[in-house]
Amino acid sequence: MILLVAVAAGLLATILRSRLTGRPLKTIQLKFGWLVFVAVLPQILVFQIPAVGRLISEDVAAVVLVSSQVLLFGFATINMKRPGFWLLALGSLANLLVIVFNGGWMPISPGIVHRIIPDLPSDFPLVGRRLGLSKDWIYADPDIRFPWLSDRFTLPDWSPYQVAFSFGDILIALGAIWLLWSLSDPENKEIK
């Protein structure tokens, strides 16, 4: 979710900047761009389409998540010379590390679950289970390895849509915004 908002904001900002300054948008040459599709498609199938997600075992889902993160980190690393990609790589690495060290899942604490699902009964057993069909596994706070990299941030309480996200997600979002902003830089040459 945070990445979609970042992409939308980055595109809107760079298009507005381009129109206001009269600068044409640049194209960008990315190496191994197909890796993004190969990495993201399994995540969409397993974690975003409930009919598919229910058919996939938790062991396979964890392998899908780790494999996807490895591919995304590889893609970001290969393209490190492009604007914003060092942030994309750092965010991907942060997410990969916390997922690997927490059994192949993005850890989330019961307190954060209650923030994003405020109507959940306080005595509902959470620890030791997957949060719905998501990529998150609910751990007791002391059991989370690298807790500062877990899904621990939420949107403000006034937001009608509640979601948890990680520090790595924030870095990835900032990298995406930077990359998109660079498309309207003053130089009229392609980004290679």
Image (spheres, rainbow, N blue to C red):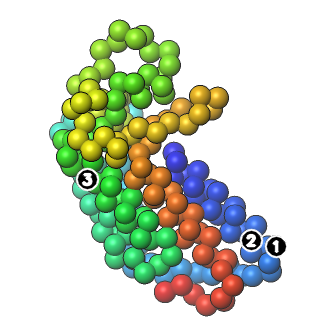
SS assignment at label 3? helix
Identify the residue at image location x=56%, y=68%: 178
Would residue 56 be visible to someone looking at this image? no
Q: How far apart are marks 2 and 1 (CA)?
A: 5 Å
Q: Identify the disc placed on residue 20.
A: 1
Reading the chain from its start, which is encountered first: label 1 or label 3? 1
Q: What residue type is labelled 1?
A: Leu
Question: In the visual, does 175 lie left or right of 127?
Answer: right
Reading the chain from its start, which is encountered first: label 2 or label 3? 2
Q: Are marks 2 and 1 in contact (CB under 8 Å)?
A: yes
Within-10-Å neighbours for mark 3: few <14, some 14–19, many 20+: many
Between disc 1 and disc 3, the foreground one is: 3
Q: Distance between the residues labelled 1 and 3?
A: 41 Å
In front of the other: 186 or 131: 186
Q: Give the residue pinned by disc 3.
A: 97
Q: Which amino acid does label 3 sit on?
A: Leu
In this rendering, the count of numbered labels is 3
In front of the other: 52 or 2: 2
In front of the other: 7 or 170: 170
Q: Position of residue 189 (x, y in %)?
A: 61, 90
Question: In the visual, does 124 lie left or right of 105?
Answer: right
Query: Compared to 17, does 147 lie above or below?
Result: above
Q: How far apart are marks 2 and 3 (CA)?
A: 36 Å
Identify the residue at image location x=47%, y=78%: 82
Query: Compared to 69, does 84 lie above or below?
Result: below
Q: Give the residue pinned by disc 2.
A: 17
Q: What residue type is labelled 2?
A: Arg
Question: In the visual, does 125 lie left or right of 48?
Answer: left
Identify the residue at image location x=49%, y=82%: 29
Q: Position of residue 54 (x, y in %)?
A: 30, 32
Identify the residue at image location x=26%, y=26%: 140
Q: Where is residue 176 in the image (x, y as percent from the top left)?
A: 52, 63
